[in-house]
Amino acid sequence: MAKSKENRIVVTLACTVCKSRNYTTSKNKKNNPERMELRKYCNTCREPALHRETK
């Protein structure tokens, strides 16, 4: 039987420059309780920018 995905939650990433919500991803809340930060490409800014996890 497959393991359940109880600890994984879906989070939305928002650009810190233009505040647009561009990406969704999942994370393990038990292993990473703090907010996720990734450097990803923003279509609005047309450059790679820091994206932070939002509520």
Image (cartoon, rainbow, N blue to C red):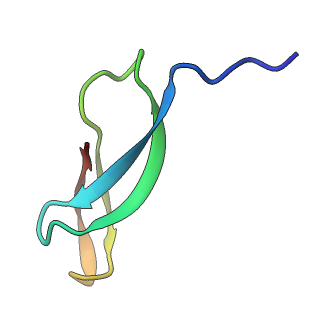
Answer above or below: position of 1 versus 23: above
Viewport quadrant of the N terminus:
top right
- In the shown orientation, is residue 4 left or right of residue 49? right
Q: Residue at x 35, y 23 (%)?
A: 32
**In the image, residue 50 lies at what x, y percent?**
21, 58
Answer above or below: position of 28 versus 40: above
Q: Residue at x 25, y 58 (%)?
A: 14
Q: Residue at x 11, y 68 (%)?
A: 17
Q: How many marks?
A: 0
**In the image, residue 38 lies at what x, y percent?**
31, 50
**In the image, residue 45 lies at what x, y percent?**
21, 81
Viewport quadrant of the C terminus:
top left
**In the image, residue 9 lies at what x, y percent?**
47, 33
* Residue at the front extreme of this rendering: 55
* Residue at the left extreme of this rendering: 17
* Residue at the right extreme of this rendering: 1
Q: Quadrant of residue 24?
A: bottom left
Q: Residue at x 57, y 19 (%)?
A: 6
